[in-house]
């Protein structure tokens, strides 16, 4: 629940790193707080002021600086929107090694600053691996130019890694050098309906074994999430026969270099799965057209919106063991029921979806309204539950301002102490995104 409403009087939209540097130097000398803002799609309140900080919006820094289509290395302004970079790369037969539902608004600088995971981390890995260099304006206005396009550069500490996931608390990212990936010549997807959650991991193993190098996404959708997506018109519903008796769904995507080769693999996988006794799946709907491919993805990518339309969402983006996804959902539901809160006037649904390969579950508690009673039932309950599994209270969305109090559930005191030392080293005046990640 975002109860943090700062009142910023000023938003500046610089066009160059030099302008960002001048703004930050000015603010640092006068102890004026600064909030770096990208596409403002973050989900933990990281890009909005807590008090009266000045907002530095990167939206006007949206040029591609260079692209080398042999190496696939792209250097772009931080304010480039993710979708715009994808559009730029398409004719060059490359893709950004990142994809998320917010691609139409989020910026590459924000993606780096939140270390966004997204729908294809399984295939393209983390930004800690694909980002080669950064240009960052430090809290004293210094421009740290590490915009290397070298794949290998083992010369001292890898400073850029500090800014990936720092959520704008150590400096403002103004330029990004990233290794893009060769565009798949053929993408396909299949929505599998499972009779039981316990089949998800055996299915994951079988899918990895059979699809191997062409597997690019393996997304979990529980039944209540699927029903919400359909209710709110996200993508086209599957046939009733395909969903009857399904406890959950898995959306599998392949990205390869030859359609017939990939389809052969997919058909064989489906045949094998359907031929097993008992089968891991009830049914499988294989996209047979670009429209159906998009429609199957729309069910998954539309879940955030569907949840938001259904009610007030308490969002928990957590890392827990892959085989515990359902247990976490059931325990949360039972806990709320034990408090008499599982009914339409309080909590309407507890839904789960997420990135199985990353062990990342999006636990969404959909309430009729935000209330202190529901929040006190959920926190610290959910955080303690995650800690019990030695998980993370924030898998990919970051801490922002909303989860600073929960950091100790996933980071020990020594780790937090050294984070504070690093923050102090870079930002001794505490002007850079104050109140985010680390409590004031
Ligand atoms: P903002 O929201 O503007 O800012 C996010 C944080 O980064 C803030 O702390 C801000 O201060 C800082 N920041 C922004 N730009 C800079 C910069 N240039 N320099 C320094 N700091 C900066 N996230 C995932 O990880 N995976 C998903 O699958 C995913 N799916 C989403 C789907 C939807 C529909 C929505 C609405 C959000 C989703 N998100 C997801 C969350 C969000 O899109 C990501 O965190 C995204 O990376 C934020 O980018 P942004 O440009 O909007 O940043
Ligand atoms: C996703 C988006 C935000 C949410 O869909 O993968 O990261 O929790 C999420 O709905
Ligand atoms: Zn996600």
Image: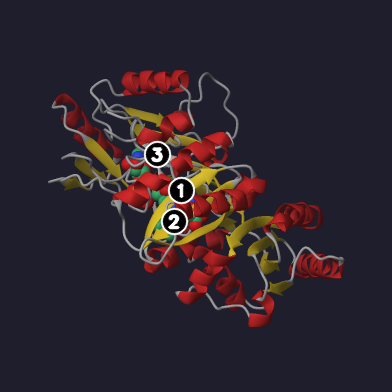
Image disc number at residue 383: none
For label 3, being within 8 Å of ligand 1 is answered no
Report how far apart the C-alphas of labels 2 and 3 lie in the structure: 18 Å
Q: Residue at x 24, y 43 (%)?
A: 56
Q: Is residue 129 above or below residue 104?
A: above
User: Of helix, strand and loop, which one carries label 1?
Assistant: strand
Q: Say which of 304 and 105 sits in front.
A: 304
- Write down the quadrant of residue 141 in the picture: top left
Q: Is mark 1 within 8 Å of ligand 2?
A: no
Q: Is residue 48 left or right of residue 183?
A: left
Foreground pick, 89 / 238: 238
Residue placed most toward the observer, 29 or 394: 394
Q: Residue at x 56, y 35 (%)?
A: 388
229 lies above or below 146: below
Q: Residue 316 got which mark?
A: 1
- Where's residue 59, x and y in %? 30, 52
Q: Which mark is residue 399?
A: 3
- In the rendered image of this protein, does residue 277 appear above or below residue 373? below
Out of 377 and 421, give the one closest to the viewer. 377
| First reached walking from the N terminus: tag 2 or tag 3 | 2
Q: Is residue 281 visible?
A: yes
Disc 1, disc 2: CB below 8 Å? yes
Q: CA distance from mark 1 to mark 3?
A: 11 Å
Left or right for 77, reference 155: left
Mark 3, other Cα within 10 Å: few <14 / some 14–19 / many ≥20: many
Indicate the position of residue 162 as horizontal and vertical percent values: 45, 29
């Amino acid at each position: 629940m975002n109860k943090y409403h700062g009142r910023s009087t000023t938003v500046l939209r610089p066009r160059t790193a030099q302008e960002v540097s001048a703004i930050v130097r000015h603010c640092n000398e006068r102890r004026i707080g600064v909030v770096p803002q990208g596409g403002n799609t973050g989900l933990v309140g990281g890009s909005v002021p807590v008090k009266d900080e000045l907002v530095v919006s990167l939206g006007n820094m949206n040029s591609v600086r260079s692209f080398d289509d042999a190496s696939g290395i792209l250097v772009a302004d931080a304010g480039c929107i993710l979708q715009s970079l994808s559009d730029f790369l398409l004719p060059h037969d490359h893709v950004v090694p990142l994809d998320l539902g917010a691609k139409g608004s989020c910026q590459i600088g924000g993606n780096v600053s939140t270390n966004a995971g997204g729908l294809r981390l399984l295939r393209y890995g983390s930004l800690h691996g694909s980002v080669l260099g950064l240009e960052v304006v430090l809290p004293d206005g210094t421009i740290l130019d590490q915009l290397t396009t070298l794949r290998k550069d083992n010369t001292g500490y890898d400073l850029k890694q500090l800014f990936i996931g720092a959520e704008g608390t150590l400096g403002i990212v103004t330029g990004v050098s990233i290794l893009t990936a060769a565009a798949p010549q053929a993408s396909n997807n299949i929505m599998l309906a499972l009779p039981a959650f316990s089949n998800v991991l055996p299915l994951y193993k079988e899918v990895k074994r059979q699809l191997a190098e062409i597997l690019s996404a393996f997304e979990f959708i529980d039944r209540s999430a699927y029903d919400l997506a359909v209710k709110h018109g996200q993508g086209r519903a599957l046939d009733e026969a395909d969903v009857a008796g399904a406890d959950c769904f898995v959306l599998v995507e392949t990205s390869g270099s030859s359609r017939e080769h990939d389809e052969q693999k997919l058909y064989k996988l489906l045949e094998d799965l359907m031929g097993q006794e008992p089968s891991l799946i009830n049914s499988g709907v294989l996209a047979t057209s670009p429209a159906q491919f998009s429609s199957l993805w729309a069910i998954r990518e539309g879940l955030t919106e569907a949840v938001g339309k259904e009610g007030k969402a308490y969002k928990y983006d957590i890392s827990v063991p892959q085989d515990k996804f359902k247990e976490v959902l059931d325990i949360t539901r039972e806990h709320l029921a034990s408090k008499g809160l599982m009914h339409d006037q309080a909590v309407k649904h507890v839904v789960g979806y997420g990135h199985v390969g990353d062990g990342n579950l999006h636990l969404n508690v959909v309430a009729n309204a935000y209330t202190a009673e529901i929040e006190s039932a959920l926190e610290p309950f959910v955080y303690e539950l995650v800690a019990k599994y030695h998980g993370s209270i924030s898998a990919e969305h970051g801490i922002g301002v909303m989860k600073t109090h929960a950091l100790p559930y996933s980071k020990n005191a020594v780790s937090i102490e050294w984070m504070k030392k690093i923050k102090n080293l870079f930002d001794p005046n505490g002007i850079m995104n104050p109140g985010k990640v680390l409590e004031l």
